Amino acid sequence: MMRQIQLIDTHVHINFDVFQSDLESLRTRWQQANVVHLVHSCVEPGEFLTIQALANQFSELSFAVGLHPLDAEKWTKSTAEEILTYAQSDPRVVAIGEMGLDFYKADNQDWQKQVLEAQLAIAHQLNKPVIIHCREAAQTLREILASFQQNQGTIKGVMHCWGGTPEETQWFLDLGLYISFSGIVTFKNAHQIRESALIVPSDRLLIETDCPFLAPVPKRGKRNEPAYVRHVAEFLSQWRGVSLETLAQQTTENACQLFQLSISN
């Protein structure tokens, strides 16, 4: 049995079809890897009932509800009310998201901004953290978050699967956000991300898989799964010069703080 540490995978998508045939063995493996809690993200509100059913199946799962920027075209005049209603309907909803900006191949940037701002308002109303996806859009995202915090109030949350430069990392730290690293940080060409991982304070650091995507070394190229968050933790502990036990304790405490989780020792 592995050493008795406790890890939290703060971003999973185990509702995807690729997992449906082996969910119970998936759970066995994450338990063997000392993953004691999962935060399940949401791509669009239509997933809510499926994710809720997974939380009924796995007591160690909390979840979010929101609309991903690559699905921004699905936003209608009723979507905000739908997210709000779902978020208030189940105490296991610990965040709004994932939301954000993805300008990598987007021709709907203005619409993405509107959808993001609407979800920020919901999170602020409910006093829940946000899970933010950001790709090729850090400057614009920084401006939106800064404006929201100045005009409407504090937003807490996490930059998930972070891939930005150290300068961009500092922007979001200065805005009070947590930074979460995925398996990308283990890739040998991820120089900027690794540099970013050195400047995040220990009380703002989170880990995730973003499974089924982006499996870390030594599982790269395979289907990612929650158990593999341990590889992210092991890499970051070595990279940051702390023990695995210390890194695990820090990131688990941070996840509990941000998402208001309660886990047993």
Image (tube, grey):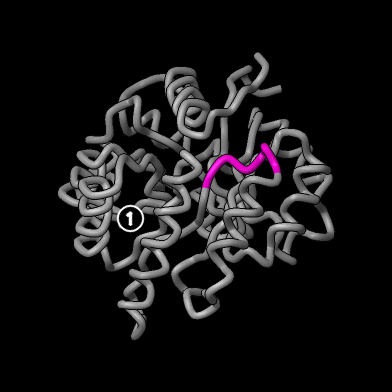
The image shows residue 111 at horizontal and vertical percentages of 37, 77
**Residue 119's quadrant in the figure?**
bottom left
Q: Is residue 159 left or right of residue 54?
A: left
Q: Which residues are magenta?
A: 90-95
The residue depicted at 81 percent of the width and 42 percent of the height is: 56
Q: Amino acid at mark 1?
A: Gly
The residue depicted at 55 percent of the width and 36 percent of the height is: 230
Q: Residues within 10 Å of mark 1 (few under 14, many from 20)?
A: many
The image shows residue 189 at horizontal and vertical percentages of 31, 57
The residue that disc 1 covers is 163
Q: Is residue 19 above or below residue 166?
A: below
Q: Is residue 26 left or right of residue 169?
A: right
Q: Is residue 93 left or right of residue 152?
A: right
Q: Is residue 207 above or below residue 65?
A: above
The image shows residue 212 at horizontal and vertical percentages of 61, 58
**Residue that extends furthest to the left in the rendered view of this protein:** 167
| 91 drawn magenta | yes
Q: Is residue 80 above or below residue 256?
A: below
